[in-house]
Image (cartoon, rainbow, N blue to C red):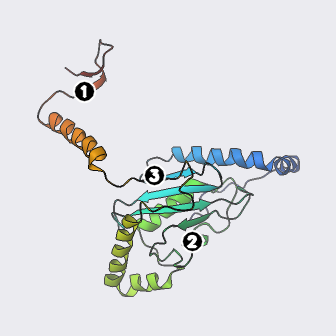
Amino acid sequence: MDFRNIASDSHFVDKDTEEVMVRYQPVFTEYTILAEYNAIRDQVKTLQDVYVIPSAHDPLNWFGVFFVRHGPYEGAVFRFHIYIPKTFPKSDIPTIAFTPIIFHPKVDPISGYMETRSAFGKWQCGVHHIWHLLLYIKRSLLVIDERNPVNQIAADLYLHNPAEFKTKVAECVEDSKLHLHDTSPYSNDPHYLRFSPYNPNIHGTFRKAILADNGNVSSGTKPLSWIKPGSLEPCSAQH
């Protein structure tokens, strides 16, 4: 997985434009971050099960979560942060950190930071984008790449003791579920991705309603449509 040569055209900025960019760097950065976030919406299918949102207080700090549907980490719900440098996009690679730390060859067991240099090399303005980082996270968790590890133990187990690696990964998956509802230094941020524990009085009612609707459809009951042809009545039965 190599993101270093995903585009061949170089990014050129003339001297006058560069002076304007320096003077209005904060404004330029803000609009760049907005453009990066909008670009993610165009990758909905590619980034399925990966969700991110910038902090309400600091647009350079993004909250993320990945619901792993298959692969060695199937069933896990991993939280991560993306820290974007102030000089972005003319900066080094934004930092990815998992909280809590996960067991993976590419994730440092002490800091939780994810190794990205081997995939991106030098961050290229106008070539690399935040959604490439999200794709890198997703691919790395679905297909293990033990090269250039920052967790040597995980890499060695993956290569030489697959059974033990699988055990460690299973523990990591369960740990992600146990800590899904933990508070964090960012818990008071309006944009922090929160998950409420299952409450049968709230979620149970909604679950039953969904199952009941599915049952009606499968038993031959006419499904509902937003608008019946020739009618202005919403959620009307189809004929």
* Front in this rendered view, residue 177 or 48: 177
Query: Image check: 111 left or right of 60?
Result: left
Upstream in sequence: badge 1 or badge 3: 3
Q: Nearer the viewer, mark 3 or mark 2?
A: 2
Total numbered labels: 3
Q: Amino acid at mark 1?
A: Leu
Q: Residue at 46% across / 53% down in the picture?
A: 194
| Three-letter code for the amino acid on which mark 3 is drawn | Thr
N-terminal-most mark, 2 or 1? 2
Q: Residue 86: tell me if it is visible.
A: yes
Which numbered marker is on residue 113? 2
- Location of residue 74 in the rendering, given as x and y in whole percent from the top left corner: 34, 65
Task: Tell which of 222 and 172 is nearer to you.
Answer: 172
Q: Which residue is mark 3?
A: 46
**Residue 142 position in % (x across, y down):** 40, 65
For the residues labelled 3 and 2, the Cα–Cα distance comes to 23 Å
Q: Please, which residue is most extreme toward the top here?
A: 230
Which-is-in-front pick, marks 1 and 3?
1
Residue that badge 1 annotates: 224
The outermost residue toward the left is 219
